[in-house]
Amino acid sequence: MIDVWGADHHGYISRLYAGIQALGYDKESLKIVLVQLVNLLRDGKPVAMSTRAGEFVTLKEVVNEVGRDAARYNFLMRRSDSHLDFDLELAKKQSNENPVYYVQYAHARICSILRMAADKGYQIPGYDDAKLHLLKLSEEVDLIKAITRFPEVVEGAAKSLEPHRLTFYLSDVAALLHSYYNKYKVLSEDEGMSGARLFLVESVQIVLQNALKLLGVSTPDHM
């Protein structure tokens, strides 16, 4: 069992463990994750809140304003024991400044490439048929290395109870994809090269989809 508490409740951990043992269970069957407080900002300025005065912003209000995807992604961008500055206006931006937009746009960009390839009659080869030896550019090698790390990243995040490892990883993969797209054409007159690059970007798309799905974040086809 995993329970998530605010850091101000740390004093209750030993008491709860004692209660579990008194009931005849192993205290190791429960894992307590302590999370720090979130600083809610708007355009870099703190949003005034006071529990004593009854002035606060609920999580539902945050989700309604910025959307489910932005809320989930932003809350998962830091270690549980790190303070988080959540800027409402930044979370709503449709630009590369917004971390979740940056990652989702990488997925949408690949969808656009694949649609264009289908329209022009390009075929995406299977693994056995793709001429992957043609992918020699440093950017291509970096992308291949990045996506092959995905199972290792997921395993590490699960074992350590640190989902923020996935958001860090997604940001890195998206940056590599955007940089590659801006420097090179995926589709060209060279059928073998086009097939290999299509295979590569489709592989990146699959990894982005799986990682975002684990975080509960959508994968839009158009943006």
Image: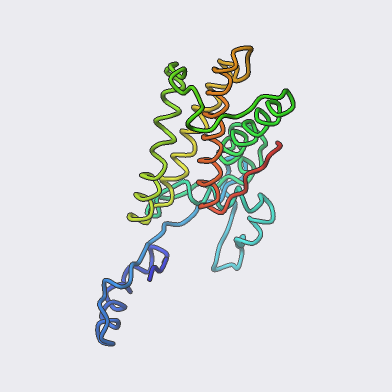
Pinpoint residue 217: horizontal percent, then vertical percent.
Answer: 58, 50
Pinpoint residue 26: horizontal percent, then vertical percent.
Answer: 25, 77
* Image mark count: 0
Pinpoint residue 183: horizontal percent, then vertical percent.
Answer: 56, 15
**Along the viewing direction, whichever of 152 and 127 lies nearer the viewer:** 127
The outermost residue toward the top is 189
Q: Residue at x 33, y 74 (%)?
A: 12
**Along the viewing direction, whichever of 77 and 116 lies nearer the viewer:** 116
- 57 left or right of 149 in image: right
Q: Residue at x 63, y 55 (%)?
A: 62
Q: Quadrant of residue 205?
A: top right
Seen in the picture, residue 154 relative to 103 is either above or below; the reply is below
Q: Quadrant of the N terminus?
A: bottom left
The outermost residue toward the front is 129
Seen in the picture, residue 160 relative to 45 is either above or below; the reply is below
Seen in the picture, residue 53 relative to 42 is either above or below; the reply is below
Q: Residue at x 42, y 64 (%)?
A: 6
Q: How is the image coloured?
A: rainbow
Q: Quadrant of the C terminus?
A: top right
The outermost residue toward the bottom is 23
**Along the viewing direction, whichever of 80 and 142 lies nearer the viewer:** 142
**Along the viewing direction, whichever of 212 and 47 lies nearer the viewer:** 212
Pinpoint residue 140: horizontal percent, then vertical percent.
Answer: 46, 22
